[in-house]
Image (cartoon, rainbow, N blue to C red):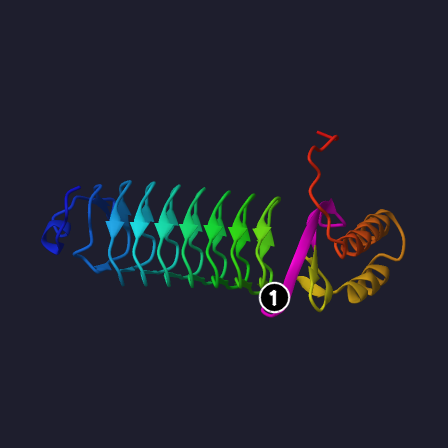
Amino acid sequence: MKKYTQKDFDKFEVVNGIVQCPTGDYSSISVFAEYCSFAKRCSFAEYCSFAKRCSFAEYCSFAEHCSFAKYCLFAEYCSFADHCSFAKLCSFAEYCSFAKYCSFDGLCSFAEDCSFAKLCSFAEYCSFAKRCSFAEYCSFAKRCSFAEDCLFAEGIKIEGYHKLIAYIGIDRIGSRLGKTYFFKCKDGLFVRCGCWFGTMEDFTARVKETHPTGRFRKEYDMAIDYATKWAEFNNEKVEPAPEDKLN
């Protein structure tokens, strides 16, 4: 793989204001300006910093303590070492992997099957597609959303400090036709419905006040009943069955 220097970088072609960066080893360069576009399988050394709106193709790899400004885009299978940090509105395609202590500002989005090592932290409004996995002690700020089959290890914290045991999401209910999340935590059962977050008791009262009667009241009541029974069921240790007869 060709190793590029700053002198090489300064000669790269610029198309519509975007620097075109070919596949290669960029470990001798530590600072990259905005609007750089990197081809697949590029590699970067420790403590690299990237300005906003940089984009990276498949299989790029980054060493420890790299930092990225807003609106950076990453294609599939990018990998990041410990302590990388990302500003708002970065987006990641499928199968990206992150080592320990990575941190993400608000509104970052992750496609399917991304994986995170322990002690990663996420700010508000981050969203995760199916089958993302999180190691121990990751933490999530307010209004993060999760698709089906995400996996959480021990010590995960949601909304900043509630230690997560398990969660479910019930989709397309209520006046928003949105997804309502029920989080079973060490300190109780909590609900995320749109911008609202609170205890199951507070959510039940809010539903009765907002929807005294009608279809939406029935939908939320059924969701509350199901989530309550699900949380009770999760008090038990259930061994996986050798075969699922429903499939």
Label 1 CA crowd tier, 10 Å (few <14, some 14–19, many 20+): some
Considering depth in this image, is 233 or 104 the residue closer to the camera? 233
Q: Nearer the viewer, residue 181 or 167?
A: 167
Residue assigned mark 1: 159
- Residue 233 in percent (x, y) is at 78, 52
Q: Nearer the viewer, residue 217 or 188?
A: 188
Say which amino acid is labelled 1. Answer: Glu
Residue at the image position 36 percent from the left and 49 percent from the top: 79
**Front residue (pair 89, 22):** 22
Residue that sits furthest to the right in the current view: 213
Q: Position of residue 48 (x, y in %)?
A: 26, 60
Relative to 10, 135 lies left or right: right
- Which residue: 78% across, 51% down? 230
Is 225 positioned to the left or the right of 92 in the image? right
Q: Position of residue 9 (x, y in %)?
A: 15, 51
Element assignment for label 1 = loop
Q: Picture coordinates of residue 246 (x, y %)?
A: 74, 31
Provide the residue span drawn in magenta. 158-181
Left or right of residue 150, residue 33 in this image: left
Q: How many marks do you count on the picture? A: 1
Main SS type for the magenta part? strand
Q: Furthest residue to the left?
A: 7
Residue 234 image-quadrant placement: bottom right
> Does residue 182 appear in the picture of this structure?
yes
Residue 173 lies in magenta, yes or no? yes
Residue visible at 61% across and 66% down in the picture: 159
* Image quarter of residue 84: bottom left
